[in-house]
Image: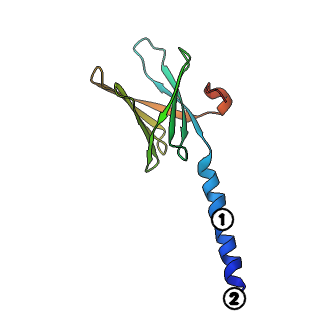
């Protein structure tokens, strides 16, 4: 009977270890092609545990944090005029600019919290 609590304790420790790996915020930088030749860059802070989706625009210094949706290794945010969907598996992002009826796709890569531009 003493083995059951030991096994249960080991299982709980494994569960807690795997849960903490999801708690870290994921920082991404994503680029969209622009007719000017210079890509549009947006940085994102995704925190699935807190349910937050941060958007930082390096060109203007604009930063916002909203409630996002996380499912099937995708993160999405609907801001009304613009909606974002990031596929963490493929490293792609779709920007739906509803205000003008246009969608475009970009690519994302992981960056450090320090490079993200988000205030720590």
Q: Are marks 2 and 1 in contact (CB under 8 Å)?
A: no
- Image point (30%, 21%), residue name: 99
Marker disc for residue 14: 1
- Image point (70%, 83%), residue name: 3
Pick the quarter of the image with the C terminus.
top right
Residue position marked by numbered label 2 in the rendering: 1
Q: Position of residue 86 (x, y in %)?
A: 45, 38
Query: If you read the primary sequence from the N terminus, does the residue marked by circle 2 or circle 1 appear first?
Result: 2
Left or right, 112 with respect to 87, comes to right
Task: Name the secondary structure under disc 1.
Answer: helix
Q: Position of residue 27 (x, y in %)?
A: 58, 35
Pick the quarter of the image with the N terminus.
bottom right
Say which of 10 and 5 sits in front.
5
Q: Nearer the viewer, mark 2 or mark 1?
A: 2
**Whether residue 39 is situated above or below residue 7 in the rendered picture:** above
**Whether residue 101 is situated above or below residue 10 in the rendered picture:** above
Left or right, 80 with respect to 74, comes to left
Q: Position of residue 71 (x, y in %)?
A: 43, 49
Q: Position of residue 40 (x, y in %)?
A: 47, 19
């Amino acid at each position: 009977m003493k083995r059951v609590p030991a096994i249960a304790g080991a299982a709980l420790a494994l569960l807690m270890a795997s849960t903490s790996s999801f708690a870290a915020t994921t920082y991404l930088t994503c680029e969209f092609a622009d007719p000017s030749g210079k890509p549009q860059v947006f940085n994102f802070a995704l925190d699935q545990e807190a349910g937050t989706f941060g958007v930082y625009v390096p060109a203007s210094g604009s930063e916002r944090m909203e409630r996002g949706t996380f499912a099937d290794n995708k993160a999405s945010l609907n801001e009304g005029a613009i909606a974002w969907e990031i596929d963490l598996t493929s490293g792609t992002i779709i920007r739906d600019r509803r205000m003008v009826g246009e969608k475009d796709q970009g690519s994302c890569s992981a960056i450090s919290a320090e490079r993200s531009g988000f205030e720590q």
